[in-house]
Amino acid sequence: MLNLSAQELPPVNTFSPEDYRGESQNWSISQSKEGFIYVANNKGLLEFNGADWKLYPTPNETIMRSVKVVENKIFTGFYMDFGYWIKDQYGVLQYSSIAKRNKISPLEDEQFWSIIEMDGWVLFQSFQRIYLYNLKTEAFKVINSETTITKMFKVDNTIYFQQVNKGIYKIEKGEAKLISGSEILKENSIVFMSKNEGSLIFLTDSKGFYKFENNNLSPWNITSNQNLNKRTIYNGIQLSNGDFVLGTISHGAIYLLKNGEIKYELNQKNGLNNNTVLSLFEDKDSNVWLGLDSGISVVNIKSPFKIYKDISGNIGTVYTSIIFNNNLYIGTNQGLFYKKYKSKEDFILIKGTEGQVWCLVEIDGNLFCGHNTGTFLIDSNNVNKISNSQGTWGIKKLDTTTLIQGNYNGLHILKKKDNRWLYSHKIKGFDNSSRYFEVYENNTVFVNHEYKGVFKLKVDKDFKEVLEIKKVTSVNKGIHSSLLKYHNQIIYSYKKGVYKFSSKQDLFVKDTILSKLFSPEDYMSGKLVFDPSTDKIWGFSTDNISYIVPDELSSNLKLNEIHVSERLRKGAIGFENIEKLDNQNYLLGTSNGYIIIDLDKLQNKTEFVIEVNSIKNSTLHGDEKELTFNDKGKLSFKKNNIEFFYNVPYYGNDLTVNYQYKLKGQTDQWSNWTANANVLFKNLSFGDYTFNVRARVGNNLTSNTYKYKFTVLRPWYLSTGMIIGYVFMILLFSLFMHNTYKRYYKKQRERLLEKQQKDFEFKALANERELMRVKNDQLKADVENKNRELAISTMSIIKKNEFLNTIKGELKSGESTGAKKVIKIINENINNTDDWQMFKEAFNNADKDFIKKIKDIHPALTPNDLRLCAYLRLNLSSKEIAPLLNISPRSVEVKRYRLRKKMDLPHESNLTEYILKV
C-alpha cells in the first residue's frame, strides 16, 4: 500500500458547491475551444471561465448527467431529454432539445449518462440504448440493447460499450458487434477502456486491469493491480502523456504511470473535497478535473511545483534541508527527519534531535546540525552531540581544523582533534545572539542582530577574544534582515534593499542589481540564501521567489523570478529556506512541509489570452441590459453605466491571475492590478471611449489586450437638432440682446450727455461761485484793509488829540498871553473838521451802509449823533471817544445817554451792542 503521508503532490484547486452555486454531485466535465469548463451538475449545466461560475438550470429541472462540447455546441443529456446549448448574441447559453425537435420518445425513466463525438456523429448513451446523431444532416440512428448498457468508451477511433451479462461490444457500420463475451467482462463492471502496446485494456470496478490480446483476456501484469483490487473504481481516463487517472468510490483519485505503477493518490486528507470521484476530465492545459460527490477539484499535474503536505502534523515547519549520503534530511521545529531520497517512504525522526533544528551544514564530508540545544554530528540516523551551547544558528569553516558557530549568546569555536570534532571555547567579549554572521578578511567578523543592527568585530588571531566592537551606522537595523557572504563580499539585506560592504569606504553601499530581488512594494523578508554550487543567490517576496545568477554570455548578473505566492508557500517569515536537490529540482521549506520546484518546467511558458465574456449596460437605478459583442457600442445617455466581465481560462492553483484596465476617453492611466474580474464605470459623460483590459498570470502578461470601443450618445437636449435649435435661439437671443443693448446704450449715451451738460453747468456755477468767493474774499480783504486804515486813522487822531490836550493842559497852567494863543491853535486843530472828514471817508469805505441805515432807522439823529454812532460802531470806549470829540469822558457819557433817548432804547438794552447789530 502506498504511504499517503509521504507523497509529493501537484497543486490542487478545489471548488465547493457554495463556490459554483450548484448542488453537490458533478457527473461529467468538458471544455470549449475558448477554454471554458462545462460541468453536468445535479442542478444543471455549470459554466466556468476561470473567474466566475454560471449555472444554467436543467430545462426540465432534473439531474444533468452528461456534457460534451463539440465545436460551438455544448451537448447535454439528462432525464428524458438530450440536446445542445449554444451561445446567443449576448454570450448567454440557450438550449435546444434534439429529442423534441426530432420527435424522439425516450423510454420510461430514460437518462443519458454519456456523450461521445466521433467522425461527425454525436452518441448519447442511456442504460437502455445508444442514439447516434449526425451533426450535418441531423439524421438519427438507435442501437438497442437487450440488457443494461453500463458505460460507453472511445478508444482510438472506435466506440465500445458494455452490456451486462453479455460482454463488450463495438459499433461498426452503425451496428453493435460483440468482441468478447468473457466471463470477466460479463460479471464485472467495466469502468474504463484504453490501449497499451496495441492491445485493449479493461479496468474493472474491483478486480483491477485486464489486457485483451489475441482474443484472450488476462490480468494486466502491473504492480498496481494488487492495490486496485482493494478499491472500488468508478471511472478512469488516459492522459495525453500516456499516464492514467482513476476515480474511486471512497478512496479519491489514483495517478498511475503509463507502466501501471502508482505515482500518488489524492483524497480528502491531502487536498480533495470528497473521496467519491464521479467524473474525470483532462483539459487543454493538462489539468485533471475531478467531478466529486461533493464539489469539484482541479489537479495541476504539469505544475513545476510538487507539494509535500504534513498531513499528520508530526513534521511541522521546515527550516532547513540537505541531501547527504543519498538521504534527504529536513530540519523542522519538531526535530531532524530523514528518508531515502526519492523514496516513497515516510520521514523518520532521528532520536535525540527533538526540538528546533536551525541549520544543516556539510563540511568536509561531515553533516553538522545546528539545534536549539546545541550542535550535532549526523551519521545516517545516528547523532553525536559535540556542543551543548544553546541555540546553534549556523556553522562555518575557518580552516581544516576550526569551525565557528553562531549561538544565542554569541560566537563559539569547534576544533578537530584526533579526527574528531569537539567543542573548544566561546569567543569572549561579545554576547549578542549571532544568527547571521560572516568571517571577513583580517580576522573581522560581521554579525547581524535583527533588533540591534550590524556589528563589525575585530577578533584576535586565535579567535578567542573580541578586541573591538564597532556598530555599523551605514545601514539600519531591520526585522527579518539577513547577512551573508557572496563572492567574498559581505551582503546585508533588509527592507530598503541589498547592500555590499566596501572595505575602502568602511561602510555598506546599496547594490542596485541585488536589490532587485525584492521591491519595497512586495517586501516580505530580507532573508537571502546563497547556493555556491549553482552560484545562485535567492530572495523571497510576497508573490515571488527570485534568484540572481551570472549571465552565461556576459559578466552581468541576471534576475529570474518564480511566481510562488505566499498563499501557496505558507512559510515562516524570516526563516525562508531553499536547497538544491538535483539537476533543476529545489526544496522550498513551508510551515507544514515543503514544495519541490522543477526549474525545467518553469521554462515551458503558456501563452495566456484574455477575453471579455459579458458586457452590461445599466441606468443609475439598476435597469440592466446585455450588450452584444457585435453591437456598435452606442449607449443611451440615460444608460451611461457600463460593466465589463472578463477572464483568463487559467485553472491552476500555483499562479494567481490579476487584471488591469483603462478607459481611454476618461483616462490614459492603467489601473492597479486587481484580482477582480469585472469593472463598472458609472455615470459616463457623452463621448467616445475605448475599454482596454489585460491580465497577468503569475509574472506572465497575456499575449493580447482586449479592446472594446463604444460611444455614450449625447442626451436629447444636446442632440444635433437641439443644438441647431439652440444655435437659432442663441442667434435670436443675441439679436434681441443686441437691440436691447443698442437701446440701452443709446439711453445711456443720452443720460451721459445730459449728465455731462449738468456737470458742465454745475462746474460753471461752481466756477461762478468760486469767482464770487474770490471777489468776496477780495472785498473782505479790502474791507479789512479799510478797517485797518480806519483804525490806524482813528488811533492817529486819538493820539494826536491826546498829545495836544496834554500840551494844552501844560500851557493853561502857565496862563501867559502866548500860551493862550497856542491853546487857541490847539483847540482849532483838535476841532479840525478835516480829521472828521478823513475819518468819515474811511468809515464809509469800511461800512458804507451803516450811516444810511442808522439814519433811516432814527431820522432825528444829528451829524454829531451820527459821528458818535460811528465811533461806537468801531466799539470804542468813552475814554477813547473823548479825545476825538475834544470833550471829557464824562461828557461822552452824557452824549451816550442822550443818544439812547433819541433812539428810544429800552433801559436793559446796551447801546454799543445795538449799534453793532445794525
Image (tube, rainbow, N blue to C red):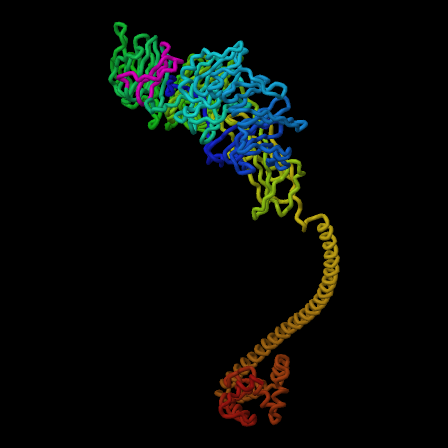
Residue placed most toward the observer, 2 or 606:
2
Q: x and y percent of residue 440 in the render?
A: 36, 15
**Relative to residue 397, is residue 181 drawn left or right?**
right
Residue placed most toward the observer, 225 or 551:
225
Do we see residue 503 in this rendering? Answer: no
Is residue 178 inside the magenta stretch?
A: no
Is residue 342 inside the magenta stretch?
A: yes
Residue placed most toward the observer, 349 or 472:
349
**Relative to residue 389, is residue 722 drawn left or right?**
right
**Relative to residue 493, is residue 721 drawn left or right?**
right
**Relative to residue 675, is residue 708 drawn left or right?**
right
Count of all numbered marks drawn on residues in the image:
0
Instruction: Determine whether 482 is above or below 913 in the image.
Output: above
Magenta-drawn segment: 325-353
User: Residue at 56% across / 26% down in the picture?
Assistant: 129
Instruction: Determine whether 96 is above or below 514 in the image.
Output: below
Do we see residue 524 in this rendering? Answer: yes
State which quarter of the image contains the C terminus: bottom right
Instruction: Determine whether 759 is above or below 552 in the image.
Output: below
Report which quarter residue 89 is drawn in.
Answer: top right
State which quarter of the image contains the N terminus: top left
Extreme residue in the top direction: 418
Q: x and y percent of residue 733 in the render?
A: 72, 57
Residue placed most toward the observer, 632 or 284:
284
Instruction: Determine whether 395 is above or below 694 in the image.
Output: above
